Image: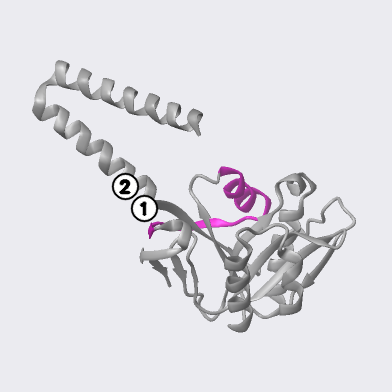
Amino acid sequence: MSSKIAEKGKIQSSLAKKIRLQWEEKGLAKTFIWITGRILKTIQVTFVNLKKHYILGKNLSDNFTFIQDKLDTTYKFIEIHDLERFKGIRRPWRRWLKTFEGRLKRGQTCIACFYKEGVIGYIWISLTPETDKNVGLTVRPKVNESYGFDLYVVPEYREFLIGFELISRWLKYSKGLGRTKAIGGVAKYNKPMLLTMKLAFGFKIMKRLHSLVFFRSRGIIISSKEVA
């Protein structure tokens, strides 16, 4: 407790020093503007999260390589009774369980990778409108499109091409359904995924957009970008 109080005191002392220096060097008006800017920046970081995204697309009539991972894994389309096996990789689990159950009940599809009885990766597939509260996007696939989203692989297994095979299986499954295009959203900062989608699978950028999320940790959208 005493160490936390001491740390808090250091932060307050440092901030007071910065305010005093601003006052001495730039005067009252500019100090007020500087303090206001700091407050607004804190509010933006804490509550409002502006995200830039790319929507990528690929024609499924094009050839694509089926990439297999390097582990002795099993892939399957999950059902509700499989969700307990996700518990070790999604936290807080209650929120994720509710989200995943809702997706399955709406008819969304999930391909999961199982290794040693546990899930180590998955990708969700939607043929109908889907809102992703984590990024603030609502995507409405056209009748010929398959939307792949929420791709996740446990970090320690990413070197084994799990994500590559999940994408391959999404494309193969979608083509089997008669869909002619696959689309997916990638955050602008996620350079590795952008390169993977573009170079390994031939996706091209269709749209550039941004989303605004309020209280992002709770997944509450105050302004979402709809992608038709």
Residue type for callout 2: Ile
Tell me where residue 73 sits by quadrant.
bottom right
* In this picture, residue 30 sits left or right of residue 179: left
Q: Is residue 142 above or below residue 218?
A: below
Q: Residue at x 33, y 42 (%)?
A: 42
Where disc 2 sits, the SS reads helix
Mark 1 residue type: Phe
Residue at (32%, 23%) from the top-left corner? 13
Residue 111 x, y percent position in the rendering? 72, 69
Q: Choose between 55 and 113: the one closer to the eye.
A: 113
Please determine whether, in this image, residue 152 is positioned above or below residue 61: above
Q: Quadrant of residue 213?
A: bottom left
Q: Which residue is mark 1?
A: 47
Which mark, by number, is residue 43? 2
Decide: marks 1, 2 in contact (CB < 8 A)? yes
Q: Which contiguous range is marked in magenta?
A: 191-214
